[in-house]
Image: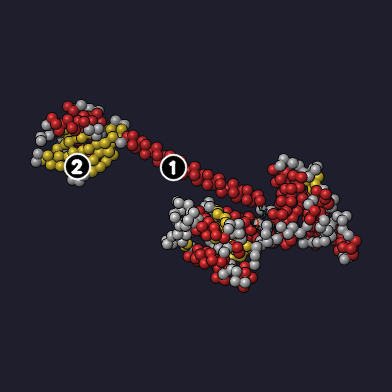
């Protein structure tokens, strides 16, 4: 079939892509209809000209034919012509005994535009995603920072320890009574770690039925057991990937699951229920307990090897009785929080504040928070009085230290010398004023004493948390 046969020409002229043929000297020999449209010239103005001439005329650039003749290799280039972009592939082939270059030219203007658009959109999505993550992080940090209440020595030491330990990927065990802030501290550890933009996943081992703990934690494959979800289930270990897994009430983890947790801690691997394949887990583990795990080990209720694995870094969260200086700031913090939440403007009267301050708070911060919330909601008028207090707090006599309250009994007074008694009152008044006014100067003004006098007393009573 000759090059100019009608059939062959008709087929090539029907193609949406351009076909351009030049001889071994780079002289244009033939082009199809699409190619004439692409180049914007009639056949007569192209055929007979060299590709170099056409390139100089600005018909296309660069010339693929020229490159193919030089390299003798199939070559693909993006060409521009009349503001459009083309993907041109040149092949060296023999036609009727002599070498020719056939260039197949595809208009890719729209594809390039679409891909540029896609690239831009992808970059934008990435940028937005990063912004959202940053916002989430700073919001978390902000709200969390706002929440950290406490200037007592014990609390400050604990926060310092959390800050020091946070960036290390080691397992941390948080201990302390119920309601002291173990979950709160676990979140703090996560937010201050390098994993802070990844998930923080919590499981309370005592809140989930024993039979479900394993599937919750490790997930299962499809058809793992009767009644299982047909698609299988992702476990919390997988959900926490990249981030932190917080195991609250670890002492309640069933004994038969403890080896599986040990494997997770030691090798960072686990096997979902119904699977035989080990999965990798990139997680940091924080555990918490209000039980004495060492005693549990002795009682064979907790595995010794797991205890030692968990016990790498232990942080004890102090209970309120060991951080009494924090009661007042906590009371004011929650008062403000719930006044705002319930659109109220209530305050404690002096006796109530003293009673609350000297109550032992066996339920720790949680009890204190709940009590203040209830008081804000139920107070009859804007001043919360002793009568508003729940019975267990109202009826508790103040025995921990002497106070300015007229409720101090003569019996208590008898245990102290008059000087001790007065000193206690003085110390307490100064502490109150410092907390309330923030600086020694303002506190001195409020108490009607000079600044040097308050400074002397601050030293004398070793007051440092305000
Ligand atoms: N330093 C703190 N400053 C302000 N609020 C705190 C602080 N620590 C804890 N809280 C608040 O106290 C409440 C109880 O804290 P959290 O739930 O962390 O205690 P927990 O020790 O984990 O309790 P449990 O042992 O019962 O699980 C929460 O509302 C928490 O926000």
Q: Tell me the residue at 18%/28% (across/down).
A: 43
Q: Tell me the residue at 14%/37% (across/down).
A: 23
Mark 1 CB near ligand 1 (8 Å cut): no
| 10 to the left or right of 112 | left
Label 2, secondary structure: give it. Answer: strand
Q: Nearer the viewer, residue 376 or 10?
A: 376
Q: Tell me the residue at 63%/51% (across/down).
A: 145
Number of callouts:
2
- Locate the C terminus by quadrant: bottom right
Question: Seen from this angle, which residue lies furthest front?
Answer: 226
Number of other residues with Cα within 10 Å of mark 1, as a class: few under 14, some 14 to 19, many 20 or more: few
x and y percent of residue 119 in the render? 40, 41
Label 1, secondary structure: give it. Answer: helix
| 88 to the left or right of 388 | left
- Locate the N terminus by quadrant: top left
Residue under numbered circle 2: 91
Work out whether 386 lies above or below 158: above
Q: Nearer the viewer, residue 463 or 154?
A: 154
Residue under numbered circle 1: 123
Q: Which mark is residue 59?
A: none
| 237 to the left or right of 389 | left
x and y percent of residue 456 in the render? 81, 59
Work out whether 2 lies above or below 351: above
Quadrant of residue 67 in the image? top left
Q: Tell me the residue at 32%/34% (across/down).
A: 109
Number of other residues with Cα within 10 Å of mark 2, as a class: few under 14, some 14 to 19, many 20 or more: many
Question: Seen from this angle, which residue lies furthest bottom?
Answer: 298
| 24 to the left or right of 438 | left
**Ligand 1 picture quarter:** bottom right
x and y percent of residue 411 in the render? 89, 63
Mark 2–mark 1 Cα distance, whole angstroms, equals 36 Å
Q: Is residue 381 visible?
A: yes
């Amino acid at each position: 079939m000759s090059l100019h046969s009608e059939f062959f020409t008709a087929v090539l002229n029907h193609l949406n892509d351009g076909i351009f043929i030049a001889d071994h000297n780079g002289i244009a020999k033939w082009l199809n209809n699409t190619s004439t449209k692409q180049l914007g010239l009639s056949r007569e103005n192209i055929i007979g000209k060299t590709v170099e001439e056409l390139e100089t005329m600005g018909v296309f650039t660069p010339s693929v034919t020229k490159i193919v003749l030089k390299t003798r290799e199939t070559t693909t280039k993006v060409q521009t012509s009349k503001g459009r972009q083309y993907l041109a592939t040149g092949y060296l082939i023999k036609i009727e005994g002599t070498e020719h270059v056939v260039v197949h030219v595809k208009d890719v203007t729209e594809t390039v535009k679409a891909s540029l658009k896609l690239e831009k959109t992808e970059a934008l999505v990435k940028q937005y995603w990063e912004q959202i993550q940053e916002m989430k992080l700073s919001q978390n940090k902000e709200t969390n920072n706002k929440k950290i209440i406490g200037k007592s020595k014990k609390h400050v030491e604990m926060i310092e320890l959390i800050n020091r330990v946070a960036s290390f990927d080691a397992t941390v065990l948080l201990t302390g009574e119920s309601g002291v802030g173990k979950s709160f501290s676990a979140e703090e550890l996560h937010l201050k770690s390098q994993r802070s933009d990844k998930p923080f996943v919590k499981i309370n081992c005592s809140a989930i039925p024993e039979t479900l703990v394993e599937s919750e934690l490790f997930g299962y494959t499809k058809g793992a057991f009767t009644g299982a979800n047909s698609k299988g289930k992702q476990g919390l270990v997988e959900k926490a990937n990249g981030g932190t897994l917080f195991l609250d009430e670890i002492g309640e983890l069933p004994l038969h699951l403890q080896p599986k947790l040990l494997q997770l801690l030691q090798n960072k691997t686990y096997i979902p229920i119904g699977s035989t394949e080990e999965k990798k887990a990139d997680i940091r583990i924080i555990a918490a307990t209000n039980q004495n795990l060492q005693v549990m080990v002795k009682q064979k209720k907790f595995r010794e090897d797991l205890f030692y694995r968990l016990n790498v870094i232990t942080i004890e969260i102090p209970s309120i009785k060991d951080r009494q200086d924090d009661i007042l700031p906590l009371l004011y913090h929650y008062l403000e929080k719930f006044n705002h939440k319930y659109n109220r403007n209530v305050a404690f009267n002096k006796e109530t504040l003293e009673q609350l301050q000297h109550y032992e708070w066996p339920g720790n911060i949680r009890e204190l928070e709940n009590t203040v919330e209830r008081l804000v909601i139920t107070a009859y008028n804007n001043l919360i009085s002793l009568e508003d207090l729940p019975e267990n707090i109202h009826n508790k006599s103040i025995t921990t230290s002497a106070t300015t309250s007229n409720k101090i009994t003569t019996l208590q007074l008898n245990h102290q010398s008059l000087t001790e008694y007065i000193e206690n009152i003085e110390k307490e008044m100064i502490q109150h004023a410092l907390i309330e006014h923030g600086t020694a100067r303002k506190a001195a003004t409020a108490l009607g004493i000079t600044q040097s006098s308050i400074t002397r007393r601050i030293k004398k009573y070793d007051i440092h948390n305000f």
